[in-house]
Image (tube, rainbow, N blue to C red):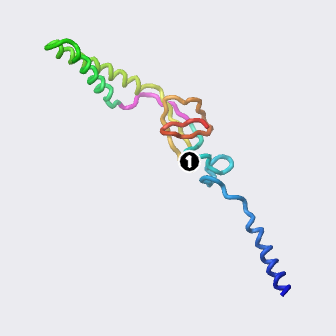
Amino acid sequence: MRAANLILALVIGAGLPACATSPAPRGYGGGYGDRYGYARCADCGVVERIERVYGERQSTGAGAIIGGVIGGVLGNQVGGGDGRRAATAAGAIAGGIAGNAIERDVRSAPRYEVFVRMDDGRRIVLTQRELGGLREGQAVQVRGRRAYPI
């Protein structure tokens, strides 16, 4: 009986080192996170590159439409009779021109494409009007459609 207990203790003792493994990585694992091998957060990543984009984006025409409506409404507040109609038309035309110019200025403003490798392995591209101190290789958190340094 004593020999059986000794053999059982040796078998159990020989198996214990196999149970002593390193702890499992937290988060997503898989080596996509930071240098410790885990994700900082579900929305975290690293800026791979930043490109400045030149040129205008496609016009939607919304600026001219909204400006025309506002100009027409304001022009309708002036005068009476034929003068009111003329003021409404002039206000709509002037508002449309102003709205189109404002939209063009917004479309042609400088913007940046920020390429981010997320901690879970995804790669995304964010278009931002300003960088807010972002630089390549920096850890970021993505909220909405913008990257913020962490």
Q: Identify the magenta region.
A: 50-58
Looking at the picture, tell me which residue is in the foreground, 143 or 121. Answer: 143
User: Dividing the picture into quarters, in which one does residue 93 lie?
Assistant: top left
- Drawn side of residue 18 relative to residue 113, left or right: right
Taking 38 as reference, is 63 above or below it?
Answer: above
Residue drawn at (51%, 36%), measured in percent from left and top? Answer: 146
Could you tell me which quadrant the N terminus lies in? Answer: bottom right
Taking 4 as reference, is 21 above or below it?
Answer: above
Judge the density around disc 1: few (<14), some (14-19), many (≥20) Cα neighbours within 10 Å.
Answer: few
- Drawn side of residue 107 relative to residue 13, left or right: left
Could you tell me which quadrant the C terminus lies in? Answer: top right
Taking 83 as reference, is 68 above or below it?
Answer: below
User: Dividing the picture into quarters, in which one does residue 99 lie?
Assistant: top left
Residue drawn at (60%, 33%), measured in percent from left and top? Answer: 135
Q: Amino acid at mark 1?
A: Ala
Residue 90 place in picture, x, y as percent: 23, 16
Looking at the picture, tell me which residue is in the foreground, 119 or 75. Answer: 75
Looking at the rendered structure, the secondary structure element under dot 1 is: loop
Q: Residue furthest left?
A: 81
Residue 78 place in picture, x, y as percent: 22, 13
Residue 108 place in picture, x, y as percent: 42, 25
Residue drawn at (54%, 37%), measured in percent from left and top? Answer: 147
Examine the structure image and report whether residue 125 is included in the region drawn in magenta. Answer: no
Q: Residue furthest right?
A: 2
Taking 121 as reference, is 8 above or below it?
Answer: below
Residue 23 place in picture, x, y as percent: 70, 58
Q: Which residue is mark 1?
A: 42
User: Dividing the picture into quarters, in which one does residue 148 lie?
Assistant: top right
Residue drawn at (61%, 50%), measured in percent from left and top? Answer: 32
